[in-house]
Image: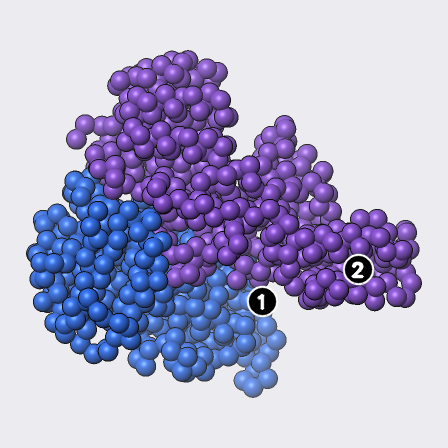
Chain colours: A blue, B purple
Amino acid sequence: MKPVKVGICGLGTVGSGTFNVLQRNAGEISRRAGRGIKVAQIATRTSKPQFQTTGIVMTNDVFALAANDEIDIVIELVGGYTVARDLVLLAIENGKHVVTANKALIAVHGNEIFAKACEHGVIVAFEAAVAGGIPVIQAIREGLSANRINWVAGIINGTGNFILTEMREKGRTFEDVLAEAQTLGYAEADPTFDVEGIDAAHKLTILASIAFGIPLQFDKVYTEGITKLTTADVSYAEALGYRIKHLGVARSTASGIELRVHPTLIPADRLIANVNGVMNAVMVNGDAAGSTLFYGAGAGMEPTASSVIADLVDVVRAMTSDPENRVPHLAFQPDSLSAHPILPIEACESAYYLRIQAKDHPGVLAQVARILSERGINIESIMQKEVEAQDGLVPMILLTHRVLEQHINNAITALEALHGVVGSVVRIRVEYLN
Amino acid sequence: MKPVKVGICGLGTVGSGTFNVLQRNAGEISRRAGRGIKVAQIATRTSKPQFQTTGIVMTNDVFALAANDEIDIVIELVGGYTVARDLVLLAIENGKHVVTANKALIAVHGNEIFAKACEHGVIVAFEAAVAGGIPVIQAIREGLSANRINWVAGIINGTGNFILTEMREKGRTFEDVLAEAQTLGYAEADPTFDVEGIDAAHKLTILASIAFGIPLQFDKVYTEGITKLTTADVSYAEALGYRIKHLGVARSTASGIELRVHPTLIPADRLIANVNGVMNAVMVNGDAAGSTLFYGAGAGMEPTASSVIADLVDVVRAMTSDPENRVPHLAFQPDSLSAHPILPIEACESAYYLRIQAKDHPGVLAQVARILSERGINIESIMQKEVEAQDGLVPMILLTHRVLEQHINNAITALEALHGVVGSVVRIRVEYLN
């Protein structure tokens, strides 16, 4: 068979990696795919290719590439929402299949893009958009298709996980590690997307859709970053037998779906609690398979290229098939998506870690216990530290049983009003993931 | 579309689980697959179904089912080599697609079965044959298709892992834990397949084929069980910062492919070293994706059913496609399989843990060091324990750098001939998996 002709839009880290891996492993890839994959055109505005471009049409116009009759598959690696959206829609209108690594694009404009793709009978593949080199989209969408998925929980931002790992292992502060991550190139100059959880929320939006068969609803994800985490809480968590991870959690409940990204205590003996540095992992709990975990590099030039090319091979195989029989973009048939609502964070249920700064006099603990008990909040364990020299306050750390967030919020308001409690109560959610 | 009609051969644990999950999640599955999956016939010789069989043709003749014109897909869950082989070949000859969970069948008769399937344009799917509910076949075959795979290493026998976990955590002996595992139903009355590594070798055979594009070669796997492991070695390994796991390792080298199942020391901080109890995990190292890990339940009624049904959904989708464009059974096109040889164990390379029982007199260590050094074997670390009260011997534990197995074998012969060394030298391979 004749090689498939692909066009690459964007020659940054992932674009270059995709080109390099396609060249280096061309033999291996065509032994699998049954036909070659030829890069026929590259659109780049900024980068000068570091490789021989003989036989490749170079352009600075991504839209010209998306409309080029010679191209079968368009690889969108320009990033962002605007140009990427226009270019993907144009490619689809021109009857081309699309492969993208752009999580923001899929999380925010995916519903529109997939509807257009169905209309034109083409595939939009996005394995590389979540957890880089880990084939977790396929695992949930196909490998676990027998299951009613109960929940998905993932460490899906490498920068955040690197920062938390350094804070725990070396007792460093958030600000200190972030500065280093920026120097190392793990974090952007503007780290907001990573450390405020927006990047993780994009990925969680996608994971939840394919797990539960719901439309993409990025604007409904509750998102809390790691910027306010202190080394004190990291080490208290450790002392209690937990690790703090920045987790994306999507859980299906009878009343709706929880979609939330936040720092989370996880028991230290869980496999996912031991995923360190820039690595990613996604746990999926299904009613038949139980808990599975998928681990690997969540970003980087070649891991992301690995998933882009896996999608290419899948698309090459599916190109000649009947569109009705293909794997649906969001795992479930477009006419079978569920309207199960996304719950506001106050209606989500979790266990909690609370740190209270108490004055060193008797009776405070009894007052704290009464406030919690009156609101139906059971205490799992309690740890009271020595009086701190500098301020004479006693850090009191509590772990609660599972409870609705609105009850914890009420309790915290009452706790902060106590005469014996100083300042704000620190609250971090706890997940057992079993 | 009309529902696809499937026939289930064998109504043991996995057969019942498959039926139950298909019924329970029928809505969820057809929302994904786009059409229903109907169990039209069940063949069982022994079991009485625990469920309502209205509308299902019951038979005790698996061959009648395999030849039934009403059936589109045959699910082979009878196990073993003989009947299973005949039944699968008959189904293929009758133009039916096959789904099987039978690792022994695929490892031993897979080449013949896949050739016949290609001839008849049908699919034989076997996700459930390796690592139960973990979709690792698909991950390697499709999710990592961009990669030149360097190595695969897996904990792929839950019984063995349960035994090793108990030995480490509770200091129990192999025999003691095995007896309990048999009582709990984790281990068969004849545990040979599990504890001697034959079951793991079946699975490794399959993993290696799809990773490297080689024919199935079960008879070339080097297989060593866990029956001779002592609690002493388990705890010495622990003291050195390692865990002992029964690992299947397939590694591609310039001179050939290593295929081996044996107890293995792994650094305790590796994620796979923390996979405990009956759980399974497979690590895959590819040149683009780096190391990925896939974790979950490796056996059991519903986890295995999860993979059987995922295969069913895949087959339903691919049924109407052009056979030329389907995912090849062994990941690589049948005419592109490689003849890269499987290496004999003497030509495999590994680091080693050696335990030597030395008489308590000076000079033994110098002699040991000389024997290793003369054979080009570098010592990574050495640990000498107290003199043991009962026999006055000194356990001397060495970790070597990576070396060809034949050199270690030569060295061990020389060590055992030393006057100061008593009994056999214990040798366990060490893998760093990074």
User: Up-down: is A367 above or below B253?
Assistant: below
Q: Residue furthest bottom?
A: A390
The image quadrant that residue A258 belongs to is bottom left
Instruction: In this rendered view, identify the residue nearer to me: A352 or A150.
Output: A150
Pointer 1 residue:
A239
Which amino acid, by three-letter code, is at mark 1? Ala
Q: Chain of mark 2?
A: B
Counting other residues with Cα less than 10 Å from the Cα at mark 2, is it few (<14), some (14-19), or many (20 or more)? many
Percent across and percent down for residue B410 are 74, 54
Question: Helix, strand, or loop for circle 1?
Answer: helix
The image quadrant that residue A389 belongs to is bottom right
Percent across and percent down for residue B398 are 73, 61
Q: Would you say the residues marked 1 and 2 are in contact, meaning their CB atoms lie under 8 Å apart?
A: no
Can residue B100 be seen? yes
User: Up-down: is B101 above or below B290?
Assistant: above
Q: Residue at x 29, y 75 (%)?
A: A50
Q: Are marks 1 and 2 on the same chain?
A: no
Q: CA distance from mark 1 to mark 2?
A: 36 Å
Can residue A339 be seen? no
Q: Chain of mark 1?
A: A
Question: Helix, strand, or loop for circle 2?
Answer: strand
Pointer 2 residue:
B396
Counting other residues with Cα less than 10 Å from the Cα at mark 1, is it few (<14), some (14-19), or many (20 or more)? few
Q: Residue at x 32, y 57 (%)?
A: A26
Residue mark closest to the camera, 1 vs 2: 2
Q: Residue at x 23, y 49 (%)?
A: A316
Instruction: In this rendered view, identify the residue nearer to me: A418 or B89.
Output: B89
User: Up-down: is A320 above or below A89?
Assistant: above
Percent across and percent down for residue A387 are 60, 78
Which amino acid, by three-letter code, is at mark 2? Met
